[in-house]
């Protein structure tokens, strides 16, 4: 069908896709109300969700009631902060009281959460309005976003293509201009991969910075809560409100030193994707904003092996009873991955866990010298077609899942803050650049915004 390949709109602009900062300003100055913002978001859902399948549940009445309450608070001069009155979306592996948590699986059909996850409670205390739940790859176990009992989420830039996963519905909701903030999870790239493929920002805080209580676990030793954002600069808004940005020392006099990690050390990649990201960094270097230096990742294949062993064993352990009693309720893609995951032995898992601290220390040593931030591509390809399980990567063909995770998964093993920011397009589809910092997320916000400006996406 020709409509399946039609993008929802032309390249978005800041006016069409306002940032959290802009929404906060509109609400604070009275040029918009929360009720108006929620109403517009609901109208946008009605217009585009049949195409992109970003939302699996929408709480219309609850969101409008909540917005009216928050508008009253603003009229009474009781603002809660920059998220006050802002509509958001939450991935359907995270509990929101009174809403379904079905995890994209027939296993949990009809499951209603009675208590919200602590993160959701905190966001609501800060004034956010939860519109509903977004589509997830089944049990968050996949980077493609097209395997779910709720159906595949679709890329707003090309409806025939993947959003990426597993937080694909959240990325699509932001990319389609429904919300400026959507909550996701990230175990091996589940926020950063869909952010790159959909042309938005995906933010993974450091491991353990946000409690994962009330989130259906995938691999507890690697699970992070993450965020999809319309604007890279809004990492500072979210990070500041959630206490993720500790006080910074006084800024130095020189430019930020960015260490470039050669993507080919992690796997095959499209040279055009690499060139697009390098071009953005060269532009910042020419402007004197950064100093670009080479960085060499120690034993990258070993890092990937440790990650895969830990993830596989923990996923298989978490699904043991459901696999035994309800294998037929899983999507076929998920069954295949779970059967493979069960091949990891307890001894292999123990060995991987024992090797992890030294591997993490080796990587963090890259920041011990002159490097402030590491940079590389987020995904080695642009968004594949829905259902594509072998993708062209440069001159080769590689398993799509493996390719999509090849650049992101090790940073869940390391646990450092990481972000994917828009870095332009290749062949009309978005490209993401990945940035990693050792501790604080603040340099990721500042450099991420600069990268997107250098790529001509944010003025």
Image (cartoon, rainbow, N blue to C red):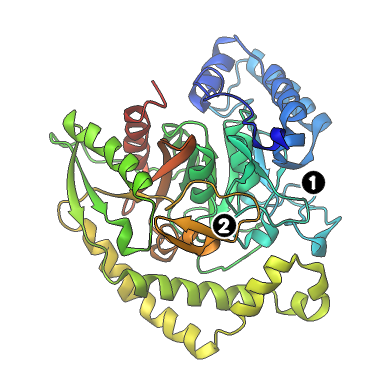
Furthest residue toward right: 110
| Quadrant, the C terminus | top left
Q: Residues within 10 Å of mark 2 (few under 14, many from 20)?
A: many
Identify the image quadrant of residue 126. Answer: top right
Residues at marks 1 and 2, CA–CA distance in whole angstroms: 25 Å
**Residue 27 spot, x, y in % from top left:** 59, 16
Q: Secondary structure at mark 2?
A: loop
Residue furthest left in the image: 253
What residue is pinned by disc 2?
143
Q: Which structural element holds mark 1?
A: loop
Instruction: Give how far across and how far down residue 170 sits, in percent.
Output: 62, 42
**Residue 427 can be seen in this image:** yes
Q: Quadrant of residue 63?
A: top right
Q: Earlier in the sequence, mark 1 or mark 2?
A: 1
Compared to 20, does 341 lie above or below? below
Mark number displayed over residue 99: 1
Could you say which is closer to the camera, residue 451 or residue 208? Answer: 451
Name the mark on residue 448: none
- Side (left or right) of 340 relative to 48: left
Q: Is residue 435 left or right of residue 290?
A: right
Q: Is residue 125 visible?
A: no
- Look at discs 1 and 2 and give the one toward the viewer: 2
Q: Is residue 13 above or below residue 135?
A: above
């Amino acid at each position: 069908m020709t409509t399946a390949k039609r993008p929802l709109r032309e390249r978005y602009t800041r006016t069409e896709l306002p940032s959290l900062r802009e929404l906060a300003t509109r609400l604070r100055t009275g040029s918009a109300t929360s009720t108006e913002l929620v109403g517009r978001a609901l109208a946008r859902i009605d217009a585009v969700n049949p195409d992109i399948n970003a939302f699996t549940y929408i709480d219309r009445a609850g969101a409008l009631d909540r917005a009216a309450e928050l508008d009253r608070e603003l009229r009474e001069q009781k603002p809660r902060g920059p998220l006050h009155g802002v509509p958001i979306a939450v991935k359907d592996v995270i509990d929101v009281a009174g809403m379904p948590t079905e995890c994209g699986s027939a296993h949990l059909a009809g499951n209603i959460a009675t208590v919200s996850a602590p993160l959701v409670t905190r966001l609501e205390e800060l004034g956010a309005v939860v519109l509903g739940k977004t589509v997830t790859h089944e049990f968050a176990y996949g980077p493609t976003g097209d395997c779910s009992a709720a159906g595949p989420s679709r890329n707003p830039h090309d409806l025939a293509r993947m959003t990426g996963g597993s937080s694909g519905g959240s990325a699509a909701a932001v990319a389609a201009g429904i919300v400026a903030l959507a909550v996701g999870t990230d175990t091996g790239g589940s926020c950063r991969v869909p952010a790159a493929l959909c042309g938005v920002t995906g933010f993974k805080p450091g491991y353990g910075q946000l409690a994962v209580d009330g989130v259906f676990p995938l691999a507890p030793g690697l699970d992070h809560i993450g965020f999809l954002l319309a604007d890279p600069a809004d990492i500072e808004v979210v990070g500041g409100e959630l206490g993720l940005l500790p006080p910074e020392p006084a800024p130095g006099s020189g430019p930020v030193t960015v260490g470039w990690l050669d993507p080919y050390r992690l796997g095959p990649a499209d040279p055009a994707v690499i060139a697009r990201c390098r071009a953005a960094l060269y532009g910042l270097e020419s402007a004197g904003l950064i100093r670009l230096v080479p960085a060499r990742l120690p034993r990258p294949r070993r890092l990937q092996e440790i990650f895969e062993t830990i993830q596989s064993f923990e996923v298989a352990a978490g699904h043991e009873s459901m696999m035994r009693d309800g294998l037929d309720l899983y999507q076929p893609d998920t069954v295949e991955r779970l059967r493979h995951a069960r091949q990891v032995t307890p001894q292999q898992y123990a060995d991987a866990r024992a090797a992890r601290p030294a591997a993490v220390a080796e990587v963090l040593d890259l920041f011990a010298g002159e490097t402030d931030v590491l940079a590389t591509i987020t995904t080695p390809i642009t968004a594949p077609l829905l259902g594509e399980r072998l993708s062209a990567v440069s001159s080769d063909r590689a398993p799509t899942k493996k390719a999509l995770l090849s650049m992101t998964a090790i940073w869940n093993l390391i646990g450092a803050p990481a972000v994917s920011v828009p870095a332009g397009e290749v062949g009309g589809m978005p490209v993401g650049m990945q940035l990693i910092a050792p501790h604080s997320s603040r340099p990721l916000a500042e450099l991420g915004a600069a990268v997107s400006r250098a790529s001509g996406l944010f003025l």
